[in-house]
Amino acid sequence: MCGHCCKKSPVSLLPHEDILLRRLAEFFNLEYRSTPGYKFYDALSRSYIAVSYVMELVDNKCVFLRDNKCLIHDIYKPFICRCFPYVPRSVKYNIVWSSKVIYHTVEYGISSECTFMKEYGSFLRNILEHDSSYIYRFLGREINVAREMEEKRLILLNMLSNAWRNGRVELAEGSCSTNRVVNLYEFLRTIYPDLPYFLGFNRLAIEV
């Protein structure tokens, strides 16, 4: 592990990952900072529901980076870290208001911040121009992790859509002056107690 990617930019997280990493930081007595990413406004609770989070760097590096090694590598490593350098270039959240459906679209690419890609990127791009399937031989594990991340994101959005259709939330357009933000995972757990099983969190030693 070179640790280069752990010092370049904030880390994009799914809502349940933010909760887990916050608890891990408390366990290791580390300073943890995160901010909500994309949010939907719920008119019933008069609050925003955050469907993504961003973990901020502390002292210009990931808070879990110690001696150039990931402190939580064997406990839980976020999806975005495991799929690097195959990462989302953009994630868009969409709403079909008439049917109360929330879905997302995502575009992936290979990060130029990867030190390996900086050295061999042009060589690999030349190969991919002639054989696009080569990317699966080169980044097969990372692509599978990315697919799992999008499956988990879709599970959360589908559950929020169901909650909307069942009258548990009332998403509204526009913005509001409220500063109250609710984590989507925490909100959904009040409706779906078995949510950790759907997300695979039941296999972790730490409870979320």
Image (cartoon, grey):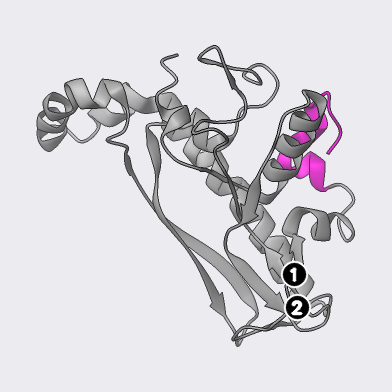
Q: Which residue is mark 2?
A: 165
User: CA–CA distance between discs 2 and 1?
Assistant: 5 Å
Q: Which residue is mark 1?
A: 162
Q: In the figure, residue 101 lies in which quadrant?
A: bottom right
Tell me if residue 13 comes above or below residue 97 in the rendering.
above
Task: Say whether marks 2 and 1 touch (CB < 8 Å).
Answer: yes
Instruction: Determine whether, in the image, residue 157 is placed left or right of residue 7.
Output: right
In magenta segment, residue 203 = yes
Instruction: Determine whether, in the image, residue 75 is placed left or right of residue 148.
Output: right
Q: Residue at x 45, y 20 (%)?
A: 3
Q: Position of residue 2 (x, y in %)?
A: 41, 15
Q: Amino acid at mark 2?
A: Arg
In magenta segment, residue 11 = no
Q: Residue at x 59, y 84 (%)?
A: 97
Q: Amino acid at mark 1?
A: Asn
- Depth check: give the residue in front, 150 or 47: 47
Q: Position of residue 147 (x, y in %)?
A: 50, 41
- Depth check: give the residue in front, 128 or 65: 65
Residue range in magenta is: 195-208
Tell me if residue 190 comes above or below residue 203 in the rendering.
below
